[in-house]
Amino acid sequence: MTLTISIDAGQAMPSIPYQLSSVSSGMKRSVMRDLIKLAVDPEIISFAGGLPASECLPLDEYRECVDAVLRREGPRALQYGPPFDPLREWLAGYMRSRGVECAAENVFITNGAQQGLAILSRLLLDPGDTAVVEAITFTGVRQVVEGQGAAIRTIPTDLVTGAQDDALEAAFCARPKPRLAILITDFHNPLGVSISAEKRVRIARLAAQYAVPIVEDDPYSALRYAGYSLPPIKAFDSAGAIIYASSFSKMLAPAVRLGWIVAPAALIPHITVMRESIDLESSSLTQRAVFEFVSRGYLEPHLARLNATNRERQAALLAALERQLGGLAQWTTPQGGLFVWVTLPEGVDTWAMFETAVARQVAYIPGAAFAANGGHANALRLNYSDLKPEAIEDGVGRLAEVIREQVLV
């Protein structure tokens, strides 16, 4: 693909043909980035984003931590610097508390979970390779795989127990053999479901048996407000076949842009080199401020407040869906996270009705946006975390009117 750009500098200038790579030509912009502006439009009740409750962001505590770091460390906190070892040690302890055998040497700090996925895809995939992903998955997962020019092989996801392990084994057995798989463990984006405990054990065994690395994408597990916490798949990994990726974006604040990878120590130098080809390192100030935050014990009460709010807002959404769409639609009932997946009657096209919904000042993300193989036009994803209960009630009412009109057509 050739992109021609004309430069107007007050005089005639030749057009410059930019020859885009085959990989970049095939990549699509994330629909989330296109629709995220709706999440901040005060005129629209937006279920489209993935924002935490704004009033629960720890402004005072984080400001206190940044100030403390700057006072104590001065210019050093604003310089380039290597990964902050105290934060790596804390993360290793956090992972051990979740059942993962982990030392600081297994921890690599990233600018969010998405960067972790991008680094690992670049590290493990060549153009033309095959990667296994869920048929319905976060758009960022598809972007990092397709961004490497890799082919996607999909597996279905059960709306109660998560990624289907029998299908995963079949995908590992198929030819060409996949080089990588990416699975979302807890409170799946967009489905809201979590992989069951039994499946986690088997998935770890399958990765070892077939020698296919699995990247466990787990940014939401700290956002649990019902049921019991489950160990990550990585906790059952005895072969070094599971690479774990997570983030502070959902558990602390999105603008922190700080995440981590847990991988075999032998892989960390290779991850480091790949990261250096992108942006060298994460902010020294942010790493120190986040460590200050967690070491002062601020994370646990922050999560308690955040998850109490999430619980209240999810309950408001589920109750409104039952009142407005009971008998007409089906939806998932997650035990945490930020999303509910709604399935409407066959024939309803949530892309086609999107403009009508926005005209009624309500927004969502159409299910087809997450479908790697197409389909799922009759589904949609709803986020509730940054909407107060009264807005949720109003928004579901508006959305239900649009849906009923589509069903009656």
Image (cartoon, rainbow, N blue to C red):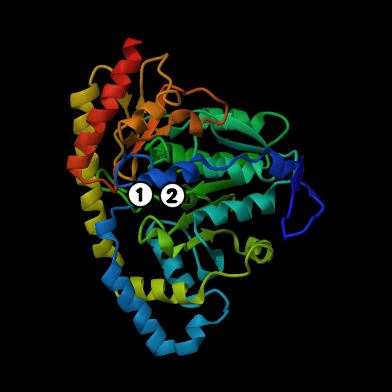
Q: Which residue is drawn at 25% across and 52% down?
A: 307
User: Is residue 357 left or right of 10 when viewed as pictured?
Assistant: left
Q: Which of pointers 2 and 1 lies earlier in the amino acid sequence?
A: 1
Classify mark 2: helix, strand or loop: loop
User: Is residue 109 left or right of 192 when viewed as pictured?
Assistant: right
Quadrant where the C terminus is found in the figure: top left
**Residue topped by disc 1:** 40
- When the figure is inspected, residue 299 is found, relative to residue 319, above or below; the finding is below
Between 187 and 17, the one nearer to me in the picture: 17
Question: How far across and how far down the image is residue 205, in percent?
Answer: 54, 41
Between 185 and 247, the one nearer to me in the picture: 247
**Quarter-of-image position of residue 182:** top right
- When the figure is inspected, residue 115 is found, relative to residue 225, above or below; the finding is below
**Residue topped by disc 2:** 232
Q: Is residue 248 visible?
A: no
Q: Which of marks 2 and 1 is in front?
A: 1
The amino acid at mark 1 is Val
**Quarter-of-image position of residue 349:** top left
**Quarter-of-image position of residue 69:** bottom left
